[in-house]
Amino acid sequence: MQTNEDGTTTIGVGLISVGWMGQLHSRAYANLRYVYPDLKIKPRLVHAADPAPARAEEAVEVLGYERASADYREVLNDPEVDVVSICAPNFLHAEIGIAAAKAGKHFWIEKPVGRGEHETRAVADAAAEAGVVTSIGFNYRHAPAVEHLRKLIAEGELGRITNVRGQMFADYSSDPRGALSWRFVRGLAGNGVLGDLMGHLVDLVQYTLGPIAEVSALTSTVYTERPELPMGTGTHFAVIEDGEMKPVENEDYAAMLVRLSGDAVAADAVGTLEASRVAVGPRASYGIEVYGTGGSAYWDFERMNELHLSGGLGTENQGYTRVMAHPGMGDFGRFQPGAGTSMGYDDLKVIEARKFLQAVLGREHLNSNIQDAVSAAQVVTAAERSAKARSWESSAPVAGTTAAVRAERGPTLAG
């Protein structure tokens, strides 16, 4: 890192895996200067790694990295790289995350960080030992409407929170001809929709309401076979005609009954959470509904720039009102001048990049961190145990997360 006379700090960026998410991280870094010029942070795209020659070439020719390699270790060994984005497939996350920590590189890693709680904790331990800053790809928490919802809950505007309902329903695997990518193989992905989507939903609940303390879960595999997709080709959206059928080894659908911690802002609230990758109808219906004694609210990613709010019993605002995201909500004003002009998915990653690099520079620690990943993985692993044993399972509090806490203390912003 280098700070110029005008106070602008240049940060060398490395990228591991130049797929869709790697491209998205790269655009987020590039856009940071335009969206947040006052931060005086200038990401420099230094070194990308991908074993596919075409993608390595794309990193230089299209994304603007100065150089590219086939081996991710070359990125980690590059002295000009200060921070690393880890966007490889799930089964490589723990290996690369631990290696990045040992190399002394701060890293922004996509979820799930590991195939379950054990691998995620191993990455957390390595990061703690190395003293590096971490950030996790829990992008939905950055939507301005979600940030506003969190604030309303913390300030008691919805009264005592009684229950929550959340869903993450996607259709990317709803076609039975959908390719059997690594996401469907337990040895590569670990669990299925629990890690892929339910982990996001758990984070959304814990970020807005507080830690989940108990779960009771069930799972289902709707399509037990799919046509195989060769490793390194296509995406999990691919559809294959007349391919060789191979078994699906993890779950397509998961549901949980949950009880929140007594130390949460929504102390002892209960709820239901569902996730599916085979839903027919919803395209990316990722949302949360929060009910309290003084009102309620709901948000859905398919209408990301809206929050629906209801006042309490007998008030003039009882019944839902659509509130459009506006410059008073979260970082909305950084992207759009007024309500009705919408932000998009990519913008959430720009916010995520901003929070990550601010933390790296020792400024505000507003970023999701490795302890948030541990907490989400712990809940998901408890759900797996529950579904297998048909039992209630507990999830102990994890220190150092950004989960919401009691209203009188306000939201925590741990590093």
Image (tube, rainbow, N blue to C red):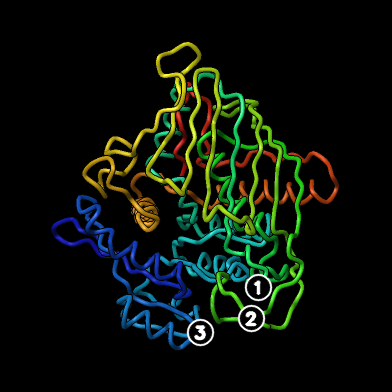
> In the image as oriented, which residue stretches furthest toward the bottom?
53
| Gap in angstroms between the C-alphas marked 2 and 3 | 27 Å
From this view, report whether residue 13 is shown above or below residue 219: below
Name the spot of residue 61 as percent of width and height, x first: 31, 83
Q: Which of the two labelled residues, at mark 3 and mark 1, occupies the earlier sequence position?
A: 3
Residue 365 visible? The answer is: no
Q: Which residue is mark 1?
A: 177
- Outermost residue toward the right in this view: 389
Q: Is residue 46 above or below residue 201?
A: below
**Tag 2, which secondary structure?**
loop
Q: Nearer the viewer, residue 220 or 353?
A: 220
Q: Which residue is mark 2?
A: 241
At a point 49% along the width and 70% down the height, the residue shown is 103
Q: In the rendered structure, find residue 51 and report the number of the disc placed on it.
A: 3
Q: Mark 2 or mark 3, which is nearer to you?
A: 2
**Which amino acid type corresponds to the residue marked 2 in the rendered image?**
Glu
Q: Taking 228 as reference, is 139 left or right?
A: left
Residue drawn at point x = 48 percent, y = 21 percent: 408
Asked if the residues shown at circle 2 and circle 1 are in contact, with their CB atoms under 8 angstroms apart, the answer is yes
The single residue placed furthest to the top in the displayed view is 314
Spatial separation of the CA atoms under disc 3 and disc 1: 27 Å
Q: Are marks 3 and 1 in contact (CB under 8 Å)?
A: no
Residue 348 image position (x, y, % from top left): 39, 53
Query: Which amino acid type is marked by label 1?
Result: Arg
- Sequence-earlier tag: 2 or 3: 3
Whether residues under marks 2 and 3 lie with C-beta atoms below 8 angstroms apart, the answer is no
Q: Which mark is first along the chain, 1 or 2?
A: 1
Q: Residue at x 23, y 59 (%)?
A: 33
